[in-house]
Amino acid sequence: MAKIQPLPLPAAAAASPPSCSPSGDGQSLQKQAEYTVWMKSLVFNGNGCTVYGADGGVAFRVDNYGCRGGREVFLMDRAGKTLIRIQRKGRLGLFRRWEACRYSESDDGEETTTPWFRVQKQKADDGKNGAAVTMMHHGRGGSAAAYTIGWCAAGKLGYEVTGAGGAVAAAVERKRTPSGVVLGDDVLTLTVGAGTDHLLALGLVVVCGLMKRCL
């Protein structure tokens, strides 16, 4: 059976932390990176997903102990520290939305949450289903979408996240092995573009999993 995570690197590289900086403000430029997302929970009989970093180890995880498509889920780092809380709001259809808060820790160790982004389904001009991402922090809580999620024609979870200018900020597709074998539709590759907050991209992966009822 093919490995779903990248091959392990030497011990020195494996000891390095993930390239995502959870404590950042999301505005610092970050290099392009690739993650492997397995749409399975590490908890037996749980719902969630597991994110592997370049070192081949677990970098982030979601463990939803409730039913699929729960009203509240948490994205955690590999140590189990909560980084993002995502809540489902509204009714069915286009009125349903998902709102995310970002967790941070002050100098005195007090944990705080900050409203971060909102995702709501929408139809594109060509009639295809998609979603709009609106930022809710730093005074950018207007109605204009900062990012747009467009579903790909093939694959259960394939999609692209594009910025207001049309540049691709992140993309998800089914993972391929080095020999070109396509793995199952629950094993995905997340490519995060340079300059995109990795934690934001990972949060959108979780929201898309909830929208598709894969979590």
Image (spheres, rainbow, N blue to C red):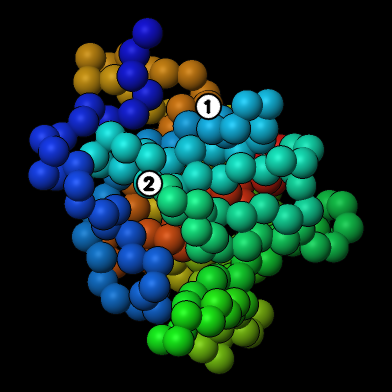
Relative placement, left or right, of 153 versus 166 is: right
- Can the viewer see residue 126? no
x 67%, y 43%: residue: 64
Q: Quadrant of the N terminus?
A: top left
Name the front one of labels 1 and 2.
2
- Residue 142: percent from left, percent from top: 63, 85
Q: Secondary structure at mark 1?
A: loop
- Residue 206: percent from left, percent from top: 57, 49
Instruction: Work out whether 123 lies above or below 155.
Output: below
Q: Secondary structure at mark 2?
A: strand
x 52%, y 24%: residue: 185
Relative placement, left or right, of 30 versus 188 is: left
Whole-number angstrom distance, CA of label 1 to CA of label 2: 17 Å
> Callout 1: few (<14), some (14-19), or many (20+) C-alpha neighbours within 10 Å?
some
- Quadrant housing residue 7: top left
**Residue under circle 2?**
59
Asked whether 175 or 161 is in front, the reply is 175
x 55%, y 91%: residue: 139
User: What amino acid does circle 1 point to?
Assistant: Asp
Q: Earlier in the sequence, mark 1 or mark 2?
A: 2
- Residue 73: percent from left, percent from top: 67, 53
Mark number, residue 186: 1
User: What amino acid does circle 2 point to?
Assistant: Ala
> Callout 2: few (<14), some (14-19), or many (20+) C-alpha neighbours within 10 Å?
many
Asked whether 189 or 122 is in front, the reply is 189
- Can the viewer see residue 112? yes
x 43%, y 51%: residue: 79
